[in-house]
Image (tube, coloured by chain):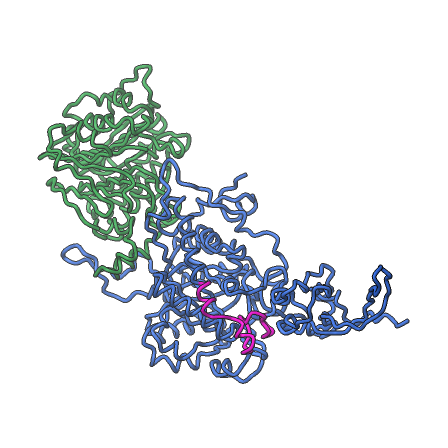
Amino acid sequence: METVKINDIACNDLPWKIQYHPERCTLCGSCIAACTFDAIGPKMERRRLTFTDSATPEPKTRFVAQPVIGQQNAIKNFCRGCGVCERVCPNNAISSSRNPDSRFNVVYATSTGTGPKRGGRNNLEVQSRTLDTLRVGRISQMTDPSLDAQRHTFDCLAPLGRILPAGTLPLNQTADGKLVQDGQTPPVRWIYPIIIGDMSIGALSWRMWEAVSMAVAYLNEECGLPVRMCSGEGGMPVRLLKSRYLKYMILQIASGHFGWNRIIQAMPHMIEDPAGVLIKIGQGAKPGDGGLLMAAKVAEHIQAIRGVPKADLLSPPNHQGLYSIEESVQKMFLSFNAAFKFRVPVAIKVAASATSVSVFNNLVRDPYNIVGGFFLDGIDGGTGAAHDISLDHTGHPAVSKLRDCYLAAVAQGRQGQIPLWAAGGLGKTGNLAADAFKMMCLGANGVFTGKLILQMAGCLGNDHGRCNACNTGLCPVGITTQQPVLVKRLDPERVAENIVNYFLAMDVELRKLMAPIGNSSLPIGRSDCLVSSDKAVADRLQVQYVC
Amino acid sequence: MCRIGAIKSRHYVHPSQALLLMQSQQKGHDNSGFAMVMQDLGGIFENYKHLPTLSLACTDEGLQITKAIMDARGFRLVHEWEPETNRQPGLDIQAMPHYVYQTFDYPDAYADASQEEKEQLLLDTRLELRRGMEEDCKGFAYSFWPDVITLKEIGDPRDIGTFFNIWEPDDQFTAKVITAQCRQNTNYAIVRYAAHPFFLQGYTALANGENTFYQKNKEFQQNLHRGYIGFESDSQCFLYTLHHTHRELGWPLSYYKHVITPLPFEDVVKREDQQQLLAMRQSLAHLEINGPNTIIGVLPDNTMFTCCDAKKLRPVVLGRDEDTVVLSSEVCGVNEILPNRNWETDMYPNEREIVVIDNNLEVQRWKQ
């Protein structure tokens, strides 16, 4: 008898197991062709066949060699559970199921000498969400009327840009009692309160990025929703930089400065200002880690846009040369304000952290009034690539930290001076309107979202470890890959249509939440209209506890 | 739902008129209190217009505290009036032992002080009195300002009128501007300070409806000025916003409406002054109101105005004759005071205007 090779990888070591029904399989090969991870392949199995060859049953047995579909027992080709095989199988012969007894984290490290990496999201603590314990519980009834979500008009815009205290506005009174502005104030854009978050070309396939841009342009030009999109750290197509659609884009710069060579070269040719500049200091999904684009995804066009060779692209964990808030405000923020002649708001994105309030306080007190937005990204945010350990074991939830920042502003009478934008797992249940509304009540001026946009496009990943292979360049739906064959799985027009439809639905849903509290403008800081069924949450967020 | 009313006249008006104005709208309020602010005073106060009058309701102990504070600050009492009260049994009123209206001369140290310094002194003194009497409800200091007196009490307005003998008109206790409301603030605790009208440094405001942005208004205002305190009623926010924009920022009254009910973005961008209006909206986003409200306000120069929320979810009507202008939640209130006026000149202000009555009783409608 052969010795049991206990240290070889077996499929029950892996996080997902293939469920295969040979009796239903026609061996058409669709599943193998579709599996981008090479997690399944054809193999031969010796099978016992029971048959009869007479008019009356006389069972006989023989053994045959039969081709079947089998799972690859290899750490490189482990099944991600994306379910594409099941989607393409015409006969329901194959699917994947989660392996609750997976030894993956151990065998990966013992086999490779490195920790696992993945894209996607935090998967460790997904049982309950703070926002789901909150309800809009202050309903206008007798003392004030609810509004009519269909009939009334609503004013659903949020500021991006530094806002001065009223007493410092350069307003002068004319002889006829009018106030006129006779001085410069920081630029402020009033935009839709939900920004499409920063996902770079590189992290996303060019078709996906194009689809999002198309959706944004359509929402602005055809639907009247001034939705803005952040480029992510990876530059932009030069044609877009020189087009009038640039006004819908927020340019991101992070510690790798990827893509900025082209952006700077395009500046003299820009016919519109961008909507803003977002300086990324940290990211909720992997705080303290820089950006990471695996070499597998650095295709030729990515090399061109970013001006880099084909290699793993790692943004440093911090901006080299910036050693303090004062310095960053004076050097980096001032530079970017000046670069666009103080016409474009410059905002900061940081990972939620136990120190966020200190950072926020420092910025809100900066004497130059040039930080035009505080983007706070929580642990449930997504990423194109990160080490498992960062995704699962570092980070800070966004909700309480957003609230802390808002209350810090309230304590100083500075609420609204640096608009607060929050993200990190918002829309996780599929309903972004509800999450956005609750975050606004807790003090956010708006929210930004990325992962949910991928879901709209057809991403198969989830918070239970499904797929999350954005880092591999093998995205089975063409969203986070640069392989032409895979990218073609994505229909950009359909994706754009999905995003537009979702935003239109969300806009209606936002009104359906504003109407019952009787408000026609966004309820920023209206924590009085939230209640929580969780006492600890209620106490922490200073909202009413209900039971 | 509550009702509010105001009278502004060329002649001195007795507060019985305010009672009548409000009593006719009795079905719209709950008879839980009566409060009024009288400005541009006549009768026994007419000779003291330039000196501040303290309006006080207090216990014996509160009276002592007041005297100690006023003495310590160096104010000199020049006139005192304690209304004769009718403490007959059976009246629905939670009366205080004393109602005191004392007029003071400024401390000697303020002989050469600027108007601004005096105004700060008056506010600080009132706030000190309020704090001094707060514990155990020893007393309530409603206003301390030249040519202004305030009366507030909990109970049935009819009985309050009987208690203070103000059903019977006379020429001793009169004013050219009276603002009044007949309801305690029953949304929250019954507190005398919660009754409209509210007063701060010459500014008076009263409102009906619900301030749904109360929390954000309050959170913002409490850091703006030492006088923005209490918040026993969500409507105090309207007064503080008025005080902040008109007095502290020095913006003309017309911009008050832009602050509390900003124009929708789609309308603002069509305007020439969009830059200023957007700057105001941005900077004072937390002073916006977004509920159903009608506000009546009076400025330090006795200019009176009214405006509504952005959807006109609360009523108000203005009626007038040659000598008097009346603002009232319901037209029956105006009918009571000015039965013979020309009804065709009544105005029902819309959601995008401020109606302003100046001291010549000229009525202007300012489109937002």
Seen at 45% across and 69% down, the residue is A493
- Is residue B136 placed above or below A490 in the rendered structure? above
Residue found at the far bottom of this picture:
A309
- Residue B322, by quadrant, is top left
Q: Quick one: B99 or B152, which is closer to the camera?
A: B152
Residue found at the far right of this picture:
A1
Answer whether residue A497 is magenta in the image: yes
Give the side of residue B94 with respect to residue A133, left or right.
left
Give the side of residue B324 with respect to residue A540, left or right.
left
Q: Where is residue A305 in the image (x, y as percent from the top left)?
A: 47, 81
Image quadrant occupied by the N terminus of chain B: top left
Q: Where is residue B98 in the image (x, y as percent from the top left)?
A: 31, 25
Q: Position of residue A370 (x, y in %)?
A: 37, 67
- Is residue A500 placed above or below B333 in the rendered structure? below
Q: Quick one: A365 or A350, which is closer to the camera?
A: A350
Q: Quick one: A458 or A328, which is closer to the camera?
A: A458
Find chain B in the image and tell me its colour: green
Seen at 32% across and 18% down, the residue is B91
Q: Where is residue A209 in the image (x, y as percent from the top left)?
A: 47, 72
Q: Can residue A351 be seen in this view?
A: no
Magenta-colored span? A470-499
- Residue B152, by quadrant, is top left
Q: Is residue B349 visible?
A: yes
- Is residue B361 placed above or below A426 in the rendered structure? above
Residue found at the far left of this picture:
B322
Give the side of residue A458 with respect to residue B349, left or right.
right
Residue found at the far front of this picture:
A55
- Residue B302, by quadrant, is top left
Find chain A in the image and tell me its colour: blue
Answer whether residue B281 is magenta in the image: no
